[in-house]
Image (spheres, rainbow, N blue to C red):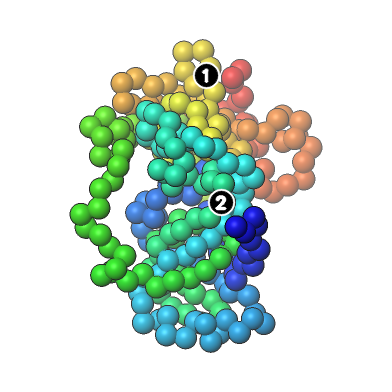
Amino acid sequence: MTESLNLRPIGVVHSPFKERVDAPRQPVLARGVQGTIELFSGRNLEQALEDIQGFNFIWVLFWFHLNTTWKPKVSPPRSGLRRGVFATRSPYRPNPIGMSVVELRKVEGLVLTVQNLDILDGSPVLDLKPYIAYTDSVPDASSGWLEAPSDPQPDYAVEFSPLATEQLAFLRAGFSLELAERFVTVLRLGPEPQAFRRIRKDGAGYVVAVKDWRARFVASERTITVLEFQSGHRPQVLATADDPALDAHRGFVTRFGRPAW
């Protein structure tokens, strides 16, 4: 029995999703998202790509490069129960290999332009295979625990208070910063912390962190209400750091102050 295997990536993914919290949990949630797969030169991969343009969908096998550990049981999004990792698409696997179907738009040299991309930027690509509908699609396949009456649970509705709406409009108008969808993506899965979501209890509510922004929210029934936003940077950093990327945070704190939470 082989105890170890050596894998050599053939390329890398270039994607708008830079961090795990940004990436859709399934390709169906990445409709229209475009990116590229760049294969490495000097390996005769140009010939390996011949004839692939005849397929409009391809399988991408890649490495979950931001994962360093694995878990035998995980908490899938929207599930009320922990599940065996092999019964999920979780990245926390003994060998962190991912697979995704993307739409192939064009091939230019060693660069493949793809759509419906749900893979993180910088992910090493291990292999490409054509998606063949008559063999890869099994219409009567069962969906296991996903077909249970109470699991997966429905998404939460996410609403914004008047103050939160004003803050979002301020960032959009003054700094072309769109925060709403980032937080909706995280919060529609509910208020409970998970491996890919930074949520903590805060009195009668919660605080969630998405990149360098924070939001305080409350949950009732299946509805989450975002009460207000805040910068995730400390006052000393905003006062001394010479970084234009912090201008939105400085403007936000000047306009709305910094609450105690």
Q: Nearer the viewer, residue 155 or 41?
A: 41
In percent of width and height, residue 245 lies at: 66, 47
Q: Secondary structure at mark 2?
A: loop
Q: Which quarter of the rendered picture does the C terminus lie within?
A: top right
Q: Which quarter of the rendered picture does the N terminus lie within?
A: bottom right
Give the residue displayed 48% in from the left and 70% down from the top.
128
Give the residue displayed 56% in from the left and 65% down from the top.
125
Please count the marks in the image. 2
Residue 248 visible in this rendered orientation of the protein: no
Give the residue displayed 34% in from the left and 54% down from the top.
28
* Residue type for callout 1: Lys
In percent of width and height, residue 130 lies at: 39, 73
**Of pointers 1 and 2, the one earlier in the residue sequence:** 2
Give the residue displayed 75% in from the left and 35% down from the top.
237
| Picture disc at residue 201 | 1
Residue 13 visible in this rendered orientation of the protein: yes
Furthest-left residue in this view: 140
The answer to the question of whether label 1 and label 2 lie on touching residues, with beta carbons closer than 8 A, is no
CA gap, disc 1 and disc 2: 31 Å
In percent of width and height, residue 58 lies at: 40, 69
Location of residue 82 (image quadrant): top left
Which marked residue is nearer to the observer: mark 1 or mark 2?
2
Q: Is residue 243 above or below residue 254?
A: below
Q: Nearer the viewer, residue 165 or 192?
A: 192
User: How packed is label 2: few (under 14 Cα within 10 Å), some, or many (20 or more)?
Assistant: some
Q: Which residue is mark 2?
A: 96
User: How packed is label 1: few (under 14 Cα within 10 Å), some, or many (20 or more)?
Assistant: some
Location of residue 200 (image quadrant): top right
Whether residue 61 sits left or right of residue 12 in the image: it is left
Q: Is residue 215 above or below residue 5?
A: above
In percent of width and height, residue 124 lies at: 60, 62
